[in-house]
Amino acid sequence: MHFNSNAMNNPSDLPIQRIVGGIRWLTRAVAKDAERSGKRFGLTGPQASVLHAINQLGSMSSAMLSRKLHVTPGNITGIVDRLEKKGLVVRERKREDRRVVLLLLTPEGQKLADELPDPAEIKLIAGLSELPPEEIEAIDKAMAAVFDIVGADVEATDDWGQDSGKSSAP
C-alpha cells in the first residue's frame, strides 16, 4: 500500500482521521479495561464480562449467555471452565429439565462480581442495543467494510481475541 504524505492535509480526510482515531481509542479502551480487571481482580476481560452478565441477569444456560454477550458458545464454555476452576461459577442442572445446565455464581463469585466495574464490552453491547435498528445496520455495514480493508492482513481471531486458526475477518 502506498501512502501520500499530503493526504491527511486535505480537509476531506478529516472523517478518515476520526475513524482511524476512534478505532485506536476503542481498541486501547477495551485492552486497558481487560488489563485493569486482570491486575485488580485476577480476571481476563471476557471472564469479567461473564461474571458481570450472570450477576446482572441471573443464572442462565451457556447458550443464553453466549447470545447475551454476542459470542460463540465455544468461547463461553472455555471461559466458564476457567471460572469454575477458580471457584467463581458452578454449573447446575435445572430441576424441571435435567438436560438444561444453568450457570450460577458461587458466593465468592458473587462477591467478586459485586466489586467489578462494568466491563467496556458490556457498556458497548448495552449502548449498541439501545440504538435504532437502522443505525445498528449502518454500523454493521461500516464495520464489514473495515474488516474487508484490514482483514486480509490481520490474523483471524474469534470473538474475544483468541486465535481461531481461520484466515478471514469476523
Image (tube, rainbow, N blue to C red):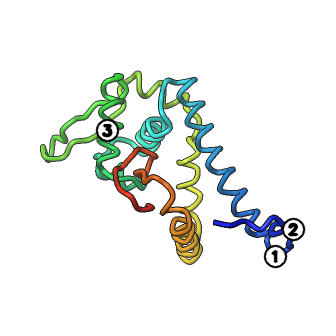
Amino acid type, residue under disc 3 in the picture: Gly
| Mark 2, residue position | 9
In this rendering, position of residue 123 left or right of residue 87: right
Residue 37 at what x, y percent from top left?
55, 30
Quadrant for the N terminus in the image: bottom right
Q: Disc 3, disc 2: CB below 8 Å? A: no
Quadrant for the C terminus in the image: bottom left
Determine the secondary structure under disc 2.
helix
Amino acid type, residue under disc 2 in the picture: Asn
| Mark 1, residue position | 12
Marks 3 and 2 sit apart, C-alpha to C-alpha, by 47 Å
Other residues around mark 2 within 10 Å, as few (<14) / some (14–19) / many (≥20): few
Determine the secondary structure under disc 3.
helix
Amino acid type, residue under disc 1 in the picture: Ser
Compared to residue 10, the image places residue 37 above or below, namely: above
Q: Disc 2, disc 1: CB below 8 Å? A: no
Task: Look at 70% across and 63% down and name the residue there.
Answer: 19
